[in-house]
């Protein structure tokens, strides 16, 4: 995260108001909630996990055992169960 000097971007009146609450410290300004991305959305990892999980479900439907799926995907048997039985 890059820090920006408030004097460079904010109006003087707003800086004076902020100084009533904080002086010489750092203030985090969060992203608007309607603009925030969900976990894994930006990197594409969420989509990758969804594809993997669907593949696990299909293999299980085709008769592959929980133990084999766990070994194949480097997961615990309980993690594979969660993926399979998730609605």
Image (cartoon, rainbow, N blue to C red):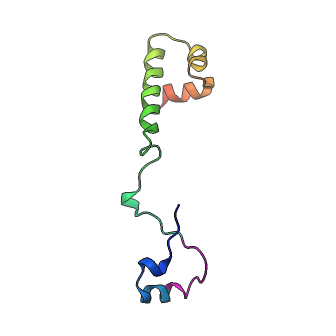
Of all residues shown, which one is farthest toward the top? Answer: 63
Which residue is at a point 61% across and 77% down the rendered structure image? Answer: 25
Q: Is residue 64 left or right of residue 47?
A: right
In the depicted structure, whether residue 7 falls above or below residue 41: below
Q: Is residue 48 visible?
A: yes
Is residue 39 depicted above or below 5 in this figure?
A: above
Residue under the image location 46 percent in, 15 percent down: 59
Q: Position of residue 20 (x, y in %)?
A: 55, 88
The residue drawn where x is 51% and y is 84% is 18
Q: Is residue 87 above or below residue 28?
A: above
Report the quarter where the C terminus lies: top left
Q: Position of residue 42 (x, y in %)?
A: 42, 46
**Is residue 87 visible to us here?**
no
* Residue segment shown in magenta: 18-27
Residue 63 placement (x, y as % from top left): 48, 10
Q: Across the whole image, how many numbered discs are drawn on residues?
A: 0
Q: Is residue 78 left or right of residue 18?
A: right
Near-viewer residue (53 or 48): 48
For this orientation, the residue located farthest to the left is 34
Residue positioned 42% across, 39% down in the render: 44
Where does the image place residue 30, in percent across and percent down from the top left?
A: 47, 65
The stretch drawn in magenta includes residue 42: no
Report the magenta stretch's main SS: loop
Quadrant assignment, res 34: bottom left
């Amino acid at each position: 995260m890059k820090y920006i000097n408030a004097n460079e971007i904010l109006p003087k009146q707003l800086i004076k108001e902020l100084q009533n609450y904080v002086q010489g410290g750092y203030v985090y300004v969060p992203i608007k909630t309607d603009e925030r991305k969900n976990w894994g959305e930006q990197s594409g990892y969420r989509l990758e996990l969804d594809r993997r999980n669907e593949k696990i479900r299909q293999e299980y439907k085709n008769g592959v055992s929980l133990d084999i799926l766990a070994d194949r995907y480097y997961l615990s048997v309980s993690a594979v169960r969660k993926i399979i039985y998730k609605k």
